[in-house]
Each structure stands twice: as structure tokens, then as C-alpha cells.
Image: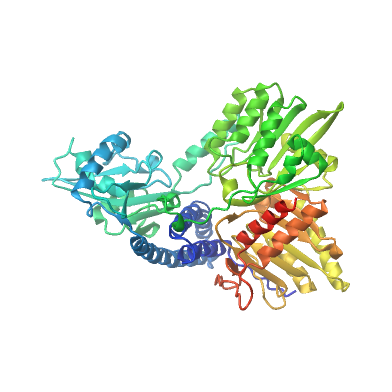
Amino acid sequence: MPEEKVYTPKELSWLSFNQRVLQEAADKNNPLIERIRFLGIYSSNLDEFYKVQFANLKKYVLIEQEQAQTSSNAKQLLRQVNQKVIQLEQQFDQLYNELLLEMARNQIFLINERQLTSYQENWIKNYYKQNLRQYITPILLDSHTELIQFLKDDHAYLAVEIICETSISYALLELPTDNVSRFVLLPSEVSTKNKSIIFLDNILRYCLSEIFKVFFDAKELNAYSININRDAEYELNTELDSLLELMSQGLKQRLTAQPVRFTYQKDMPKALFELLINKLRLTEQDAMPGGRYPNFKDLVKFPDLGVKNLLNKRLPSLAYNRFKKFRNAFAAIKDRDVLLYYPYYSFGHVLEIMRQASFDPAVTHIRMNIYRVAKDSRFIHAAINAANNGKKVTVVVELQARFDEEANIKWAKRLISSGIKVIYSQPKLKIHAKLFLIDRKENDEIVRYAHIGSGNFNERTARIYTDFSLLTADPAITDEVRKVFNFIENPFKPVSFNYLLVSPQNTRLRFHEFIEREINHAKSGKNAAIYLKLNAITDKEMIDALYRASCAGVKIRMIVRGTCVLVPQIANLSENIYVTSIVDQFLEHARVYIFENEGKKDTFISSADWMPRNLDNRIEVGVKIFDPILRSTIHDIFNIQCNDNVKARVIDKDNMNNYVQRGNKKKIRAQHAIYDYLKQLETHE
């Protein structure tokens, strides 16, 4: 292997992933409203990028400046990132305008406040009074206004210029999108197939006079869009008495953190612009000009309008038919391991297991960990019901789940009030594993049933994220799952695992062992291969190990949805590594590792990506699949994904995002093909 190793900066690779999301918005084979929603996904992704990765990059720039480094790598990378974002935003604007025209061709009109009919004007005045006025409280901008203290991260605002006879004043209006939809379908006074939709922003623009007339005799009112993204990281004061206090403090820090991105309507008056950036303690270089709409992430919720051909054809969730052959879920799992793959299979199966466990007289103890759960989680309600039925319940709540901290704090308090034992992770050691463990008394013995998966216990995301769930009563596995829960509660107590991959205990070490085994097989002339499906790969130690394997002749096939710091197809380094990425109707979230092992194909599912945080700074769990039928199912699914020639893009050193060439081959869209494959399996079950 050459001395010079090659890596793609993770920030640029991440932006390349978001470009693949834009490609879906551009794909005319996608239904119109789905294309619009992909614009919203892109916008939401970019917000998160600025709050996390861009914020960290700016810190590195400041560190280099303080250390007076002559060669500023971070500054150069920051420049490249800014150039890439500008390029993507130009593509976004072009696509947005194209989709407006396409909507018009489909008799859908996104109109502004100047295009209203007199009938619609009267309707909007009434709509404002009935639905909006209660949420609208202008913030007047004067010398005492601490704008940086109350301007919310990720919220859309209108900065209003109030021109009176002898003075000009300024105010801010927050769009109340937490309470009402960003999109309002307008009525028409005549029968027509045309559908008119107006942004909430433009309703407020139309109602400026109504809002401000109570105190201002304004001769002119003008509104301009703004929004900010704040640094999402925070420092935890570990001297606080409880993790709840500690996380509450961290959330307050995020609310007042320095903005890392300020976007504003480019035709804003200079005096208003300067007032805003001064109050936000920013420079002109920190500000990004934009259009009339400050926040496009709400396009994810663009209304479906009841027109079926403008939406993806729904794939009804499949039932796992083996459950029907048994009296209850536990009998089915005890008979043979169960493998579910969402959203193809219904997440309702897992919810039903928890529901049964909550009142099953034989169940004595339920342990679970939660990272991100649905707003009104049936999963957690089952835990509460189990406690009400006198069962011992232990819930591990990850309070450090980024952007879900506040919701998880509320859940923790709710669980504690229900008499449930709640355990928190240690600061800076997140619990990202997807586990539950049910103890059941059968014939005077305790039999345990475990869940190990790649995705959260979340009814909402299980409909749009692809994830594996293994349900097993194998004593070797369930005993180690119990040891994981003990490890979570006592992370400094020595523990070892033989069947599970548990970060930060043994995952990195086991990966090195598996890779070295494949290298030795390749050097001995045996078949050697590694197959990986990941959301991201950024860990350079693991990448170097894969580079070594490639140089030894190990064939490596990878499917990576997002960030890929590894650079494939480089001569004398990674020529045996081929990587594709699938962006489609569902978000590819499952993690799978397969090591050839002389044809035995050791196969794992896991919650962990190949990133330093997943291997070293989080509790993650992966499990080997022993059942040959389930193992074969995973291999078949992986092979279908490898053969995708509709939604798969090639990952290369130039981040070109070229689609896999189909040539004369049959068209294979993996997500649809997998649905058909699993449906066929259930037909023959």
C-alpha cells in the first residue's frame, strides 16, 4: 500500500450526499409532490449540516488562527464548503422555479399576497383573526433588544420595516409553524379544478397593516425573511447534580449559541440588515443572501392535495405470517428467530410484542432503551402499562440524542412518575443501541426474549427508514443482551462479549480481526471479500484497514448512503473497493456487515456506522445472524441493493454522483424489488 493515503473531507462528502437528495427532486420519474418534498429534505439536511459540521469547521478555523498557523487547512476547506453550498443553492433555486411551473401545469398554484382575488383577501383576513392572531406577538427592535437571546434556531421570521411620517421602526414576526401549517389551501369563489396554496409568510405579509395598526400610523410596511442556524453542540458541566439538570443546561446553551448561519432576503434595506447582523454579532461574511422564503424545510410537509398520481404509490406494510401460526409472539420467537425489515414489514409486530408483554402474566421484567421515539409513543405507553400491571420495568433514556433531548427529558419524567426505573447514559457516552429484553417465567425457569436492531423504536420513522430487527430467544444472545444492560448501568465494571459486537468494548477490535482474516485468506489464494452497508464511514483507522485489504486482493463491496471519507477505485490503494449510494423513497438506515470467511459469510446487523463516535464514544450493539434462512434473506437483500441501476449512484474520488449505468440490463429499483422479494417470501410461508 502506498505511503500516501487518500480521504475525502467528510464535510464535502456530506454535501455530496445532499446533492443526491437534490437529484431526487430533479428526477422527473418521481411524482411531483414527492419532488417538492425532496427539496424540503435537502433544506432540512443543510440546516443540520450548518448546526453541526459547519459549526465545528469554523471552530477549527479559529483554532488555526489563534495558533498562527501559516498553512490553514481548515480555512481552505471552509472555502471549498462555501463554494459547494453556493453551487447546491443555485441548483435548489433552479429546481424550485421549475417545480413551480410543473405545479402550474398540474393546476396547483403557489401564490403570493399580491395575487389574491378579492374573495381570497376577505377569506385571509378572517383566517388571520381566527387562526393566527393569537400566536402573533411582534418583537420591536430597539437599542435594548437582545436579539441573540430570543431568536430561535431553525425558525422562520419576518423582519418588518415600519415607515411612518417622521421615523422608521423595525420589528420581528415569528412564523407560528409550531401551531399552524406553513401552507394554507385557499378557497375559490367559483367551481374550478385549480388549487391555490399560499405560504403562511405571505398571509402575514398581507396582514401587516392589521398587525401593526394598533400602535403605528404607518404609511408603508415592508417585510423581509430571515432565519438563523445555531451551533448544535454544547459543553456539559459535569459537576451538576443530575443528568436532567445537565441536559437542561445544555439545551439552554444551544438556544443562545452563536449563530453559524444567517440567511436574509437579499433586497432587505441596508439599515435593517446592518441592525440585524450587529445585534447577532455577525459580519457581512457570516450572512447569506436568499429569497422571500427563509426556511424551505417545511416543504417536507407539503400537502398531498388528494391527487394520487402526484405521490408515490404506497407499498402496504407486509405481515410476518409466521406470527399467525402461534398462540402469542413469544411462542413464535422461541420456535425460531424472527427477522423484520422495515418499512416493508409492519413495525406493528414489535408494538404488539410489547403490548402482549405488558399484560402477559408470565412476564416479570422488561428492559428497553430509547433514543428517538414517536411523539405519542405506543412503545413507551406499553412500558407504562406493564408497570401498572406490577411488572418490573427498566428504561434506559438517552438524554443526549441530538435534537431529541427535550422530548426525552419529558419522557424520562413521565416514566419516573409511573414508577419505572430510569437509567441515563454517562456524559459523552451516548447509548445508541436498539435493544429490549423481556424476562418470562416458563416452567419455573426464566426465558429471555431480545430485540437487537439498527433503527429506533419509533412508529413514524419505521414507515420511512429501512431497518432490521432481530427477535431471538437464543440464550447465548439474550444473556449477552442482559450483560449490555448491566454494562449501561455500570460502565466501569469489566465485561466481555462473545456473540455481540458492543461499542466501545470490542467492536473496533473485532472488525480488525475480521479484516485481517480476509487479508490472510486473500494472500493464501482463497476467496476473500467484505460486504458493508452503512449510513456513513469516516473512521480513518478502519478505512486504512480496508485499503490494506484491497491491496491484498480482498474484494470489497459497499453501499453507503451518506458520508464516505473512503475513496474507492484508486490504483494501488482501493482498486478492489466499489461503493454505491442509494437515495430513494425510503431512507436507507440499516447497517449490515458481511465477511466472506471461506464461504461461511459471517453476517451481522448493527446500530453502528463506521465512525469514531460509533466505535469509541457510544454504546452500540451488533449481532451475528446464526439462522441460515435469515442470513440468506439478508444476503439476498444486499445483492438486490448491489444490483440497483435506477436509484444507485457511484461514489468516486470526484463526488460526481453519476447514476449506475444500466446498459442493456433489466431495470432494478432496489426498494421496490425488495418489497416484491419479501412479499414473495410471505406468500410461500
Q: Nearer the viewer, residue 680 or 200?
A: 680
Task: Indicate whether 215 appears above or below 227.
Answer: above
> Residue 11, located in which quarter of the rendered image?
bottom right
Residue, far left: 165
Q: Would residue 648 be found to the left or right of residue 135 on screen?
A: right
Q: How many marks?
A: 0
User: On the image, which quarter does residue 348 sit in?
Assistant: top right
Res 329 → quadrant: top right
Residue drawn at x 77%, y 47% as measured from the top left: 505
Residue 652 position within the rendered picture, expressed as x and y whole percent measured from the top left: 61, 72
Query: Is 239 situated left or right of 198 in this image?
Result: right
The answer, for residue 504, to whether it is visible in the render is: no
- 539 and 148: which is toward the camera: 539
Residue at 18 percent of width and 35 percent of height: 214
x 70%, y 61%: residue: 638
Coordinates of residue 568 in the picture (x, y in percent): 66, 71
Q: Observer-nearest residue: 653 or 340?
A: 340
